[in-house]
Image (cartoon, rainbow, N blue to C red):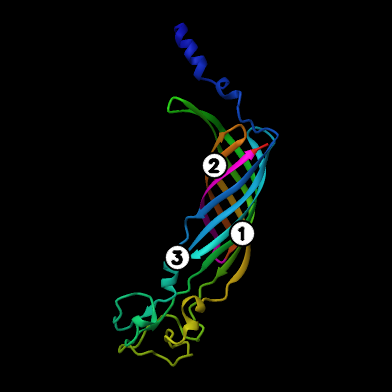
Amino acid sequence: MTQAQEAYRKAVEGKENVKDKLYPKKKKFELNIPNAGLVLNQSYVNTFLIGGGFTYFRTEEWGFGLDFTLASNSDKPERECIETFYNDPLDEIGEPCGGADVITGTSGNYGPAYVPIREIQNIIALNLAWNPVYGKQLIFLSATSYFDLFVDMGLGLVSSRYYPKEEILRNGSKSRGQFNENGSNPGPAGDPAHIGADVDEDYAYGSSGRPDPENQTNVAAIFSVGPKFHFADRFHIKLFLRNITLLGTPTGFENIFALYGGAGMRF
């Protein structure tokens, strides 16, 4: 190895190149406000997440923290549609769902589908923070960025409003089923053999016909991973994916997968 090659190796290789950190974490608090995110794997509701928290680092790699998240929910068009499905035994209607004017003059009626839907309300989590990677990179050959790759692992409590599956409408009839061959209803209104809800029974379909929600609190296992970029001596921005596994649900467990962005400072 030539003397020039040896000088180059010392300049860019080995632990000494990043040991003198500009953004050390040991025995420092990190305030994480705000963290904002969106749940990615829900079919019928949009859930926006906003919150914050703090982390205390005992070493450069390990720390522990607490964070709290509030959720805001809104219905997707798909939820409105399934809650205003039509029963259309004679295939007279060209649309699967919608307003009452569409079924006027047909043999159809409302046959909404009320599937299990969970609306997250808030999340509180205690996390173990691990920072296995600290590095820096050259941007456009003129600036250096400093970053961490971090992993959070922890337990939390998730409060939610849960709408259970319901097949019997508020008028006592089944929501969907098998009509007679001529399209007539197999039973009188109010009898479980009867199917669907008439237009004037607006309490039995749409948002008014939803089953009563249950307020639930579940223990959750939480795992997050993502990069954190440091700047201006003590500030950072970050982007991370978080998986929240709710335990003790009607199906045993449920996974909530969210994408977050956040900012904060160290002191």
Q: Which mark is residue 122?
A: 1
Which quadrant of the rendered structure holds the N terminus?
Answer: top left
Mark 3 / mark 2, whichever is N-terminal: 3
Per the image, label 2 sits on a secondary structure element best described as strand
Q: Mark 2 = which residue?
A: 238
Identified at 57% across, 76% down, the residue is 212
Alpha-carbon span between mark 3 and mark 2: 28 Å
Please state which amino acid type lies under the numbered disc 1.
Answer: Asn
Prevailing SS of the magenta stretch: strand
Question: Farthest top residue?
Answer: 3
Identified at 34% across, 81% down, the residue is 102
Q: Which residues are magenta?
A: 250-265
Q: Position of residue 107 (x, y in %)?
A: 33, 87
CA neighbours of label 2 inside 10 A, class few (<14), some (14 to 19), many (20+): many
Q: Position of residue 90 (x, y in %)?
A: 29, 84
Q: Mark 3 = which residue?
A: 76
Which quadrant of the rendered structure holds the C terminus?
Answer: top right
CA neighbours of label 1 inside 10 A, class few (<14), some (14 to 19), many (20+): some
Per the image, label 3 sits on a secondary structure element best described as loop
Identified at 45% across, 63% down, the residue is 43
Per the image, label 1 sits on a secondary structure element best described as strand
Q: Is residue 157 above or below residue 162?
A: above
Alpha-carbon span between mark 1 and mark 3: 20 Å
Contact? badges 1 and 3 (CB < 8 Å): no
